[in-house]
Amino acid sequence: MNEFRLRLTAGQVDDYAAATGDRNPHYLDPAYARRTSFGGRVLPGALVVIAALAAVPAGWARAATGLTARFPRPLFPERTYRVVVSEEDGRAGTITVREGDLPVLAIEIVRGGPSAGAVRPGVTRLPREPESHEELKRGDVFTGSYGLPRPGALRELADRLGAQAVPDALLGALAWGSWFAGMRAPGRDAVLSGLRVREAGEPEDHDPRYAATITTADARTGTLAVNASCTGTGRGIEVELRAFRRRRVPTAGRTSATSVLPAGERLAGRKVLAVGGSRGIGAAIVSVLAAQGAGVWATERAPGPVEALSAEFGADRVRPLVLDAGDDESVRAAIAALAEDGVRLDGLVLSAGPAVLGSALHPDGVDTIREFVDTSLTVALRPLTAALELLEPGGWIVLLSSGAVDDVPDQLPQYLIAKSALEALGRYCAKRHGYRVLLARAPKMWTDLTNGPLGGRGTVPVERVAATIVGWVLGEVSGTRSEDDGPAVLSPAELAEWSPDPRAAGALRP
């Protein structure tokens, strides 16, 4: 058994995309990737497989006639992973890539004889934009020329990564499979979870082409399976793909905002700053506050989602505020602009946070844990400290915590640490600044940051959680307190199950 280190850069991802035509936004579009459950750009699966193959003996690589790769977790540029190579018997070997103790890639290599006789992709121009399908169903067939824009550049990249012994046919099949999943089907919203490449059939002699058929399409989970036959000059290659199609998460709006708590004017004249208010639970809270008459400044990194809410609720109810909650200069400038306009705040909502991915207490994971905790606190502390001067005495603060604080989750130490620290911040604001503070220990909700293969199954709608939080603002929900002058706490069950009292009157209760 041998162990190696693997680290890929964003520049190598760009080189891979140029060579293969695989320009999926999960790899190349930081804004798109930031809105996903990954929280940032990820590595193309095929590129990682190629880099990992550099760790195997050259004889293995030259004799490879196929392989199977599974991706239980995403991999990211600029991170270091451990690669462990082991031989199972004379014809097979395995590669396991780990982040700390957690496996992120498993490869099984099948060795036969040299693959020089297998079909290689030709040179083909490919569209730069990925396809986006409203529906994909079992039996759908895709055909085309089996090729890549720059197969020679792919070969050069593989050589620079140390994979000189990997045959061109295998390199091409890996890259083409990744391209098909990320650019054709599922296309733009694809997350590759596994692929299998193997030589098959008798030698042929014609221009390289492919025929791919969807064999499984599960609308409930978004999972998709594709079998492709790639033929040309030499033996054919079969490529099997397993992918997840990220489904579109429902967006907040007037209908969802009034589905639990009927519209009213009980917060008319109240002014609120919502940090992280452009999507997910943050946007849902903004919508419910606006539906109750409040004027809300909702933050966003770039114009777009908050403007849509403003158009629906009116500019007097929802106002965009462009800022990066983690950037000191950006936060100071945005809050200064509010101060110059004479804005005084009655409430502050802090719901921004990074994507949550698996981790472990392992020396290799220390930086990942530290960065997550640092980011989680920074995106709360910067806007909180800047906005305190605008918050009226007796004002209120909502901090989005999690049920993980009580129900310690497996493989998420960084999440527990960050939310516990956030709650300590809320306790300080209640006890030392005298603000009315809510620690909302949210249940699992269906948002962009949790949009995995099960989608919304087993989750609580964000509008229900948001309505309960606004119910606390209105005085309809009390929560629990461990000390008289401490923050209120709403449990996951309370946030998921509360319903408004139909007898509640129009006046705002303290």
Image: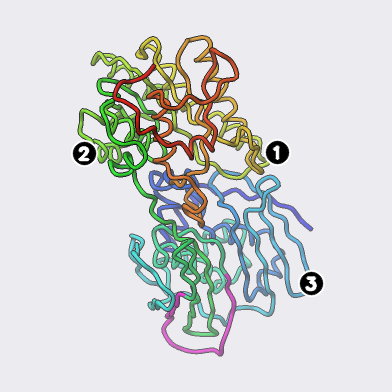
The C terminus is located in which quarter? top left
Q: Is residue 22 left or right of residue 492?
A: left
Residue 374: which numbered mark, if any?
A: none
Q: Is residue 291 magenta?
A: no
Type of amino acid at the residue the image marks with label 2: Ala
Camera-near label (1 vs 2) is 2
Q: Nearer the viewer, mark 3 or mark 1?
A: 1
Q: Which residue is mark 1?
A: 361
Q: Which residue is mark 2?
A: 311
Q: Could you classify mark 2 by the number of other residues whose Cα lies within 10 Å: few (under 14), some (14-19), or many (20 or more)?
A: few
Residue sitting at the far front = 503
Which residue type does callout 3 highlight? Asp
Give the alpha-carbon distance from disc 1 to disc 2, as whole Å: 46 Å
Nearest to N terminus: mark 1 or mark 2: 2
Image coords of residue 257 (percent x, y): 32, 39
> Looking at the picture, which amino acid does disc 1 mark?
Leu
Q: Which residues are magenta?
A: 196-214
The structure residue drawn at horizontal position 43% and vertical position 21%, both measured from the top left corner, is: 397
Question: For numbered disc 2, what is the local secondary structure?
Answer: helix
Left or right: where 266 falls relative to 385:
left
Please tell me whether mark 1 sits on a helix, a strand or a loop. Answer: loop
Residue of label 3: 89
Residue 505 falls in image quadrant: top left
Q: Nearer the viewer, mark 3 or mark 2?
A: 2
